[in-house]
Amino acid sequence: MNRIEGLSYNTVSQPTVQPSVSSKHQHSFEQALETTPDQQMLKERQQRWLQGEPLENVLGDLDPATQRKVIWQWYQALSSDKQPSQRAQLQAKLIAPVQERLWSQFGGLAGNIKPPLDMPELRKIVREFAPTGRQQETVLLEVLGEIKPIPGNEYLSDLIRQELKTLIPRNGMVDNLIRNSHKPDLEE
């Protein structure tokens, strides 16, 4: 009889052992849970802020990354029609640090400039303050609106426009996928 040489499929496989979670990862997970404020506490803080308490007093005990996350939540939840002054305050808090970093990095550049080298740095700065694509789009549009009338920012404006040319369509595709993924395909 002819026998095919190779792996035998009748061998008993060893049971796979799930790797245990290292104590370092477990500790960092527990620490993240402790530092993440619960939604009820955030709602109470938001009410205090809406009633006139300064934003620094309401969020002062949170670390900067958590503050940014909370401010983004509040910014997206507030209607620009009903509470324009509060929304403008949050917007200034979100946009100002990005604008300062971008201005210090790229403001007033002229001469020997290399957009392919500077684009990753621009993305890194923006992602630090605005992790999601929609937030990045909002930040870049606001920064572009702020710096456009200031002379000497042509290079930074061009960099931001170039990034927005890819960011806006990508956000649109993601939004379209999210909104329409539950609809049945009628072409089949």
Image (cartoon, rainbow, N blue to C red):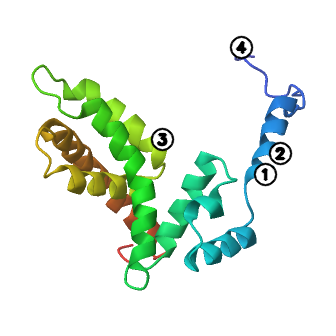
Quickly name the residue at label 1. 33
Q: CA distance from mark 4 to mark 1?
A: 54 Å
- Mark closest to the chain's N terminus, 4 or 3: 4
Does the residue at mark 4 contact the one at mark 1 (Cβ under 8 Å)?
no
**Mark 1, residues whose alpha carbon is within 10 Å: few (<14), some, or many (≥20)?**
few
* Residue 15, horizontal then vertical, whole percent: 90, 31
Q: Residue at x 18, y 44 (%)?
A: 157
Q: Is residue 74 above or below residue 158?
A: below
Q: Amino acid at mark 2?
A: Glu
The quadrant in which residue 92 appears is bottom left
Q: How many residues crowd around disc 3 within 10 Å: few (fewer than 14), some, or many (20 or more)?
A: few
| Residue type beneath disc 1 | Leu
Residue at 25% across, 32% down? 106
Q: What number is the disc on residue 30?
A: 2
Pointer 3 residue? 128
> 3 left or right of 106?
right
The disc at residue 93 is none
- Distance in Å between CA atoms under marks 2 and 3: 23 Å
Q: Position of residue 40 (x, y in %)?
A: 74, 73
Of 135 and 94, nearer the camera is 94
Earlier sequence position, callout 4 versus callout 1: 4
Pointer 2 local density, CA inside 10 Å: few below 14, some 14–19, many at least 20: few
> Mark 4, residues whose alpha carbon is within 10 Å: few (<14), some, or many (≥20)?
few
Residue where numbered disc 4 is placed: 5
Residue furthest out toward the bottom: 82
